[in-house]
Amino acid sequence: MKAIGFSNVLVAAVASTAMATGLYFSSSATATTTSQGKPQLSQLFTGDRRMITTYGRGIASATAEKAEIRLYFNRPETYLEDGSLSPNEPIARAEMQRIVETLMAAGVAEDAVEIDLNPSEPYYYGPSGANLVVTLLDPTQEEIDRILQIAQAINLDDENLYYNYSNNYCSLEDVTGLENEARISAIEDARRRIDAMAGALGVRVMDVLAAVEVHSYTPISTSCYPADNSISGDDGRPTVQIELGILVTYGIR
């Protein structure tokens, strides 16, 4: 079977990939509008060339510079005799301050803890909730774990307040270098895949005809990743990960 493709095949493949995955594409696959008002994909015309296309994935990690630990607290639910849910009193600042003092005794600076008595989330736990936001600079995994252990102990020490769960965010001030590492890794991965495909097809890889960068990362992770031993001198510190992909088409002979 001949490995022959045309530009309209490539455009259709990219468009269907975008719709199926919900991925965001950079300007090399931007949507444009013709004078007739019909949307098209631009900058993907490769001519009537023999080609193969693959997707490369790159992941890069770096030691986190800042961690934000958001602790969610709620009242226990109680029910009335008719089976309806009893309304709870809002959590008072003094109740949260006791937790802050416990964190301070464990070595957390007072100005690193913020009390939020009117959180917008999690709305599904009702209005009687409150958050503590702990911000750590150059955090270690041990510090994060200790804060979570203190929060979890609230369930044992306070009958009127309980720790629900936490969201932990780790970040870098500048992700440019890490983004480029992920980009290079994605390009290398795409090339390895293309070489394997070409070997299986019995063809020779030529020049790059088109490439689309696929952004699927954020400079703030949804969680703080465990320490990466491949990063020298991380000292047990959590890491931030960035993922970036590239859809690349090569000519073949």
Image (tube, rainbow, N blue to C red):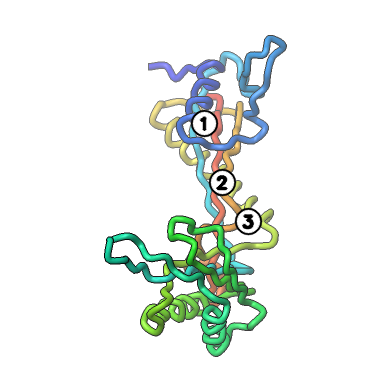
Q: Give the quadrant of the N terminus.
A: top left
Residue 229 visible here: no
* Dot 3 alpha-carbon crowd within 10 angstroms: few under 14, some 14 to 19, many 20 or more: some
Q: Viewer-proximal residue, 244 or 112?
A: 112
> Does label 1 or label 3 sit earlier along the sequence?
1
**Residue 174 on image: x %, y %:** 70, 59
The circle on residue 244 is 2
The relative height of residue 122 versus residue 102 in the rendered view (above or below) is above
Do callouts 1 and 3 mark residues in contact (Cβ within 8 Å)? no
Q: Quadrant of residue 140?
A: bottom right
Mark 2–mark 1 Cα distance, whole angstroms, equals: 15 Å
> Does label 2 or label 1 sit earlier along the sequence?
1
Q: Amino acid at mark 1?
A: Ala
Q: Residue at x 46, y 77 (%)?
A: 151
The relative height of residue 160 versus residue 37 in the rendered view (above or below) is below
- Residue at mark 1: 18
Q: Viewer-proximal residue, 3 or 120?
A: 120
Q: Quadrant of residue 240?
A: bottom right
**Residue 192 on image: x %, y %:** 48, 41
Q: Quadrant of residue 164?
A: bottom left
Label 1 sits on a secondary structure element that is helix
**Residue 20 on image: x %, y %:** 45, 31
Of circles 2 and 1, the one toward us is 1
> Does label 3 or label 2 sit earlier along the sequence?
3
Label 2 sits on a secondary structure element that is strand
Mark 3–mark 2 Cα distance, whole angstroms, equals: 10 Å
Do callouts 3 and 2 mark residues in contact (Cβ within 8 Å)? no
The circle on residue 178 is 3
